[in-house]
Amino acid sequence: MIRHTVKAMRTLTVIELSVMYRIRILLMDSCSGICIILVHLLIKFKLHFLPESVAVVSLGILMGAFIKIIESQQLANWKEEEMFRPNMFFLLLLPPIIFESGYSLHKGNFFQNIGSITLFAVFGTAISAFIVGGGIYFLGQADVIYKMTMTDSFAFGSLISAVDPVATIAIFNALNVDPVLNMLVFGESILNDAVSIVLTNPTFEAEIMSGLSLDLE
């Protein structure tokens, strides 16, 4: 009797997981399809004043609000289905994005302007990180904003300085601006992520080392 009960519970769990994954796939496919149609309509009707990224983010906000309304009315509970897990992003969405960026990259313009791109990516990101981190730290010491340690302030400054100008690049492509200007912005957005990681890791390592030294004392 106990074995049949355990087997029935396992079968029920498998069925529930199967339904949850089906709903999750349906939601992802529906969102992707609506986003594709929305971007197609923006291009078709030449609505250049509304960037594609802003339209897609606005659509996501509306869909999230719709799901919250359904949950508040107790019509359905899709918290697990709507949850966007990191593995799904890194394994399913990120590889096509990287491939498309590398495939569509104009290598001639990129390597011809590699000096300017590197200058903006390395020195520009470093200057922005120190200014933002220092500003957060000193404003926190003055009780203007939330007080943070110097390590946390510069870690946040390093992370926030890696800007991805998606809307700017989309507008540049729509308006057919100077290819050199487009490549400078696009190339800098490619390299600044690596610079941000390089700047962030030492701050966390310094905090860990300081914590270890205090423990030893």
Image (cartoon, helix red, strand yellow):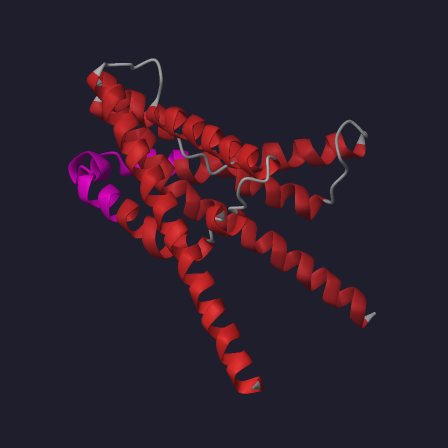
| Left-right relation of 154 to 143 | left
Is 169 contained in the magenta span?
Answer: no
Quadrant of image for the N terminus: bottom right
Estimate the x, y position of residue 81 in percent, counting from the top left: 47, 50
Relative to 85, residue 176 above or below: above
Estimate the x, y position of residue 120 in percent, counting from the top left: 40, 33
Quadrant of image for the C terminus: bottom right
Is 118 contained in the magenta span?
Answer: yes
- Which image quadrant for residue 90? bottom left
Relative to 28, residue 85 above or below: below
- Which image quadrant for residue 170? top left
Marks counted in the figure total 0
Q: Main secondary structure of the magenta part?
A: helix
Estimate the x, y position of residue 116 in percent, counting from the top left: 32, 33
For image coordinates 40% across by 38% down, the residue present is 121
Q: Could you say which is closer to the camera, residue 198 or residue 73?
A: 73
Q: Could you say which is closer to the camera, residue 105 or residue 67?
A: 67
Estimate the x, y position of residue 213 in percent, counting from the top left: 76, 66
| Left-right relation of 126 to 139 | left
| Left-right relation of 154 to 193 | right
For image coordinates 81% across by 29% down, the residue present is 142
Q: What segment carries the magenta color? A: 99-120
- Which image quadrant for residue 177? top left
